[in-house]
Image (tube, rainbow, N blue to C red):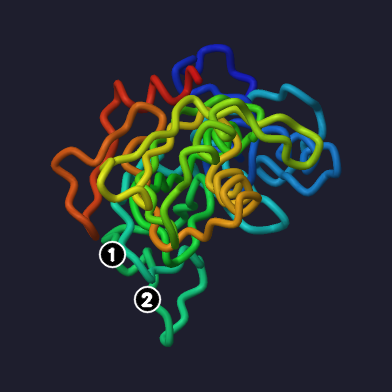
Amino acid sequence: MKKNNKLNSNLNIRLNKYISNSGVCSRREADVFIKAGVVTVNGKSVTKMGAQINQTDIVKFNGETISIKKQSYILLNKPKNYYDEIKLNITRKNIYSLIKENKGLFPVDKMKPYYTGLLLLTNDINLKNKLSNKKKKIKSIYQILIDKELKTEDLQSIRKGVIINNKKIVLKSIQYINIQNKNEIGIEHNNGGIETIIKLLKKFNYQILKLDRVFWAGLTKKNLPRKKYRELTESEVNILKRI
């Protein structure tokens, strides 16, 4: 590990951040691996917490050379019947087949194959873990088709809040999309994700037939047709990092 103070300080980086930016694991996990002695820098084991290295140093993790990857943030308008499995299966349609450069990308949250809409994929492990934290309040809007009309009394009960797993769930909003067709509803929720919506509707004996996420963490489907994707802007990434 180089200790020359004349090195360009712009190239210096904490070892745990370097490991995280390589896509191996999160910073917190990197600290555990550093302490365990599985990381070497220029052939020497480094176990000191907070160690800084130069980005030109040779870093190995479990004997394998690693390097910093360009961080990617991809917003996909997921189509129906596409799986989010990293391992490709020739018998299943896979979201990774829709993205040209998909190596090292992970979905921020899980979407069942029959659900559609916005899905963020990234190789920024720290941001992925942060946004996956159920304690984070992330605004999501869903358009949902259920198997029968939502009764007015059930709608009112859901608006007041529902106890699920000993915790009261209060949606930000729930309403009919079309008053003439009461099995189409719109739901706005700030935490808990899709699984919470499923459990909530199931408690009132409703089954979800279609679910489309049209808004997530400030991101929308505007100019993003089904099966298409785009890279987030720098401004959008910075907003996500401040959540």
Q: CA distance from mark 1 to mark 2?
A: 9 Å
Residue 149 placement (x, y as % from top left): 41, 53
Is the residue 24 above or below the residue 52 in the image? below
Which residue sits at x=66%, y=34%? 162
- Residue identifier under label 2: 93
Q: What element does badge 1 sit on?
A: helix
Residue nearest the viewer, comparing 111 with 198: 198
The disc labelled 1 sits on which kind of residue? Answer: Leu
Which residue sits at x=43%, y=87%? 91
Tell which residue pokes out farthest to the right in this image.
36
Residue nearest the viewer, comparing 150 with 143: 150
Tell which residue pokes out farthest to the left in this image.
223
The image quadrant where one finds the N terminus is: top right
Residue 45 placement (x, y as % from top left): 78, 42
Is the residue 241 above or below the residue 1 in the image? above
- Residue identifier under label 1: 98
Residue 156 placement (x, y as % from top left): 52, 31
Which residue sits at x=32%, y=44%? 75
Which residue sits at x=43%, y=32%? 188
Is the residue 153 above or below the residue 111 in the image? above
**Res 1 seen here:** no
Residue 145 located left or right of residue 130 = left
Residue 223 placement (x, y as % from top left): 13, 42
**Res 5 seen here:** yes
Is the residue 178 above or below the residue 162 in the image? below
Number of the front mark, 1 or 2: 2
Q: Residues within 10 Å of mark 2 (few under 14, many from 20)?
A: some
Number of callouts: 2
The disc labelled 2 sits on which kind of residue? Answer: Lys
Which of the two labelled residues, at mark 1 and mark 2, occupies the earlier sequence position? 2
Q: What element does badge 2 sit on?
A: loop
